[in-house]
Image: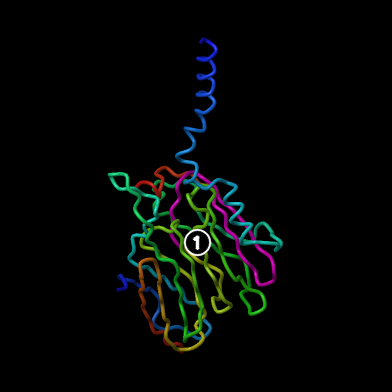
Amino acid sequence: MSKTSRTLITMPKTARKGALIEISVIAQHDMETGFRRTETGELIPRDIIRTFTCTYNNIEVFRADLHPGQAANPQMTFTVVASESGEFQFKWVGDNNYISTNQSFLIVN
Amino acid sequence: MKEQLQYNRRALLQALPILLILPCAPTFASKNDAMDAMQKIIGETPVKDGGIYFELSPLIENGNSVPIKIEVESPMSSQNYVKAIHVISEDNPLPNIFSAYLTPQSGKAKIATRVRLANTQRVWVLAEMSQGYYARTFADTNVTLAACFEG
């Protein structure tokens, strides 16, 4: 049974060919560090998102490794050159079978 | 009897710093851990200082969510581009914070994210260039409320 959560993508819908577009992504996740303790002193086990990948027409354009040092609800901003109309696929993979996917279309004219 | 007492007291005093340090020692990364983590990434590759714009506020009120911005000087062409950007902390429980892998399609080696900082410390940025070297820079910051253990 895999876990998932809400994700949000902020990017333009259209772009001129060759233009630089900025993509901002955020995933809802506690990013439990594995260093915190409960009131009774028990260690809360680590539960984080490990990797994020972004593909543009099935070609990987951005990938990130996340660690416990990443803030809760990890947010990332990166840039991509708009070369052709197509689909962006976003995927987050983490501990305890966490998988989230999202997609967005870009029209290049 | 007196000697015995002195010996015990001395032993206790000698052990005191170790007893005090021991509970927190394995949890915090030291400067050396950060250097080891960087060495692990770099390996035998040459390193040049500079060439990176690293935006990190000098005073942080809440270490649980610290915005950072990184921009590496690079034309991002198919021959000359930034392959990866690593963020490494000197005083977090784990030295590695974030690693991003870019391609020439990125157009610009510019990323932004939010991290946790456990303490007032120095944060390093390493950028792996396709031309076979690493660019490196750092920023110092003061953290008022520490992350990782609280909040």
The residue lying toward the viewer, choosing from B1 and B131, is B1
Q: Residues within 10 Å of mark 1 (few under 14, many from 20)?
A: many
Q: Percent position (x, y) of residue B73?
A: 62, 66
Q: Which residue is mark 1?
A: B98
**Is residue A34 located in the magenta-colored stretch of the structure?**
no
- Residue A36 vertical position relative to residue A22 in the rendered view, above or below: above
> Would you say B65 lies left or right of A19 here?
left
Residue B126 x/y as whole percent:
60, 60
Residue extending furthest front? B1
Judging from the image, the colouring scheme is rainbow
Quarter of the figure with residue B115: bottom left
Residue at the (37%, 61%) spot, across then down: A47
- Secondary structure at badge 1 equals strand
Numbered circles on residues, count: 1
Residue closest to the eye, B117 or B43: B43
Left or right, residue B63 beside residue A42: right
The front one of A41 and A60 is A41
**Tag 1: residue type?**
Phe
Answer with left or right where residue B56 lies relative to residue B77. Answer: left
Q: Which residue occupies 30% across, 48% down?
A: A38
Q: Which residues are magenta?
A: B113-139
Most frequent secondary structure within the magenta stretch: strand
In the drawing, does residue B39 fall left or right of residue A58? Answer: right
- Name of the residue lying farthest toward the top: B2
In the image, residue B24 sits, relative to residue B123, either above or below, namely: above
Kindly identify the residue that appears in the image at 52 percent across and 45 percent down: B121
- Image spot of residue A57 (x, y percent): 47, 86
Give how far across and how far down residue B111 sits, in percent.
50, 66
What is the chain identity of the residue bearing mark 1? B
